[in-house]
Image (spheres, coloured by chain):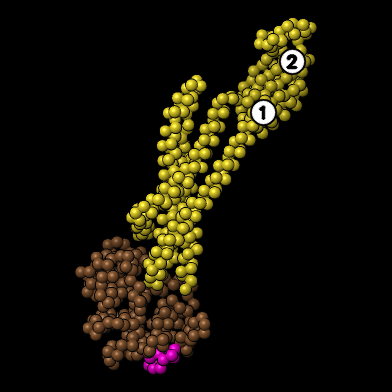
Chain colours: A brown, B yellow
């Protein structure tokens, strides 16, 4: 589903974020991406969504070479991805409902169908009763769950999460991990970047460990 | 198809809501655009009305054909027939040399002088009203008529036509310059409005791009906003013109009555009104397009 082959990413100024990274993630797999801050976790996720492009090597998503995609094809790649951004990127000028509605508006769903889907997604993350609230009034954990609702409302086959449990209480972390596992069960491919030890205790889940841009453990 | 249409009307609704929700902002822009557009439109109307007025006052231009002194009445008849067959000639009037002398002696103090003449010095003449009034066509007709053998001289009273044409050309150029400048101003106003909107909606644009919005999706609301703002501005300009004319026409009617004439300012006809609306819509769209193209390329070049 996701395949990195000798990927290098250098930022302008010479900083090497990723060095010669290769790995494969199968369809329906759930994988943790770990490492210290600055190890290149965010960069790796950005390469999958073509927010950044690799300097060398190839990034394949569903057998598509993402690094070589033309600008016009990018939107259609991203519609197939659910992304949880590290900085949430919620819009505070609109309600919880409208935040989740945005991806469906972009894809051009009709009004009735999209309302149904938004409510289903909000129900899934337990925010159905808060649909008219402005996201600024939500707690950190609720905001993260809202991000999840927005990422999955479009029913993507791949979910990328950049530090989804950063700065959250243990109780919230368990909640969010439970949501991720339920997606895993219905066949969604998940790649979750984290340095949260409590999350990583779950030894049944494969890990990719990055250290200064290099992959340490590749199963 | 239906879905695409629903999407577009959805964008349109959202844009309208934004335009009228932003308190005075959106309306103020429309006011600026409306007043800006009403100026050149008013000048254009004035020009148009002047043209009809002058045409009314001075009547149609005429060409006088003076025939040779030795012309036979048979030749005159032939010439009359050929003139009647000429498509460029609307009307002809024959003035015989005797009648011309008669008129002259009646109307002027030359009576005593004319009485001393041994023979009539005046030639037979045709007075021709051409179908077309533009100076070039008149000159051409005059030249062809002058070549006829029995014609001694063809005289075109064209000075007034040239003067009028020159005056109108001057006026038209003035309107054109004013309209061009104000159009640029209008584009600039829209450009800046859209720039500010893009700035305030930076987050939304960024998020939309990250979750799969096409460029078209992101541009659409801004382009609609520009076009609609232009259209409403044009509509307001049209209203300003209509109201001003109805206000001006009453005192004007009183004034023209004093001169024993009937003159009213004619309003914009349907074609001109539609042109005004379409033009303002286009200018708004263009300003928005320039702004979106300029400012969105900055955003997406990440």
Depth check, front residue: A129 or B212: A129
**Span colored in magenta:** A208-219
- Which chain does the residue under circle 2 lie in? B
Q: 10 Å neighbourhood of mark 2: few (<14), some, or many (≥20)?
A: many
Left or right: where A177 falls relative to B141: left
Q: Residue B171, located in which quarter of the rendered image?
A: top right
Residue tagged by mark 1?
A: B158
Question: Which SS does the magenta portion mostly show?
Answer: strand
Q: 10 Å neighbourhood of mark 1: few (<14), some, or many (≥20)?
A: some
Residue tagged by mark 2?
A: B123
Q: Residue A128, located in which quarter of the rendered image?
A: bottom left
In the rendered image, residue A129, in percent from the top left (x then y), is placed at: 20, 69
Quadrant of the image containing the N terminus of chain A? bottom left
Depth check, front residue: B198 or B147: B198
Say if the magenta span includes residue A218: yes
- Which chain does the residue under circle 1 lie in? B
Q: Can residue A29 be seen in this view?
A: no
Q: Which residue corresponds to the image point at 22% horizontal and 69% vertical from the top-left?
A: A130
- In the picture as drawn, the residue positioned furthest to the left comes out as A129
In the rendered image, residue A90, in percent from the top left (x then y), is placed at: 33, 71
């Amino acid at each position: 589903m996701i395949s990195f082959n000798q990927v290098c990413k250098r930022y302008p100024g010479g900083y090497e974020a990723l060095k010669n990274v290769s790995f494969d993630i199968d369809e329906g797999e759930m994988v943790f991406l770990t490492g210290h801050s600055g190890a290149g976790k965010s960069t790796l996720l950005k390469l999958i969504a073509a927010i950044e492009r690799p300097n060398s090597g190839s990034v394949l998503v569903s057998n598509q070479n993402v690094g070589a995609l033309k600008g016009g094809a990018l939107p259609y790649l991203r519609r197939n991805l659910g992304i949880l951004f590290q900085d949430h990127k919620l819009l505070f000028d609109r309600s919880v409902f409208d935040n989740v509605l945005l991806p469906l508006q972009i894809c051009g769903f009709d009004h009735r169908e999209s309302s149904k889907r938004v409510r289903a997604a909000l129900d899934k993350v337990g925010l159905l009763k808060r649909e008219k609230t402005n996201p600024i009034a939500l707690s950190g954990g609720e905001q993260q769950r809202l991000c999840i609702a927005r990422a999955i409302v479009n029913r993507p086959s791949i979910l990328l999460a950049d530090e989804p449990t950063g700065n959250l209480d243990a109780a919230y972390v368990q909640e969010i991990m439970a949501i991720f596992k339920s997606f895993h069960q219905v066949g969604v491919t998940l790649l979750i970047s984290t340095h949260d030890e409590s999350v990583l205790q779950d030894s049944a889940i494969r890990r990719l460990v990055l250290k200064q841009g290099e992959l340490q453990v590749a199963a | 198809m239906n879905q695409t249409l629903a999407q577009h009307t959805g964008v349109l609704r959202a844009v309208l809501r934004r335009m009228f929700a932003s308190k005075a902002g959106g309306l103020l822009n429309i006011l600026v655009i409306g007043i800006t557009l009403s100026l050149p439109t008013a000048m254009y109307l004035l020009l148009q009305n002047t043209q009809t007025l002058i045409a009314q006052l001075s009547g149609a231009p005429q060409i006088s054909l003076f025939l040779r002194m030795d012309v036979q009445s048979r030749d005159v008849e032939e010439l009359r027939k050929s003139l009647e067959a000429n498509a460029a000639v609307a009307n002809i009037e024959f003035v015989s040399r005797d009648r011309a002398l008669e008129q002259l002696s009646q109307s002027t103090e030359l009576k005593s002088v004319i009485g001393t003449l041994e023979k009539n010095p005046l030639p037979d003449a045709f007075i021709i009203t051409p179908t077309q009034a533009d100076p070039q066509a008149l000159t051409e007709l005059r030249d062809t008529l002058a070549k006829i053998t029995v014609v001694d001289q063809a005289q075109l009273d064209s000075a007034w036509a040239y003067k009028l044409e020159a005056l109108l050309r001057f006026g038209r150029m003035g309107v054109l310059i004013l309209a061009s400048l104000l159009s640029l101003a209008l584009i600039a106003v829209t450009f800046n409005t859209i720039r500010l909107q893009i700035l305030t909606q930076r987050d939304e644009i960024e998020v939309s791009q990250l979750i799969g919005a096409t460029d078209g999706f992101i541009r659409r609301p801004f382009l609609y906003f520009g076009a609609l703002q232009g259209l409403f501005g044009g509509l307001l300009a049209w209203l300003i013109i209509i109201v001003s004319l109805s206000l001006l026409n009453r005192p004007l009617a009183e004034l023209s009555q004093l001169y024993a004439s009937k003159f009213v300012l004619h309003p914009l006809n349907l074609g001109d009104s539609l042109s005004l609306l379409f033009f303002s819509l286009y200018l708004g769209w263009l300003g928005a397009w320039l702004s979106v193209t300029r400012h969105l390329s900055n955003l997406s070049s990440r």
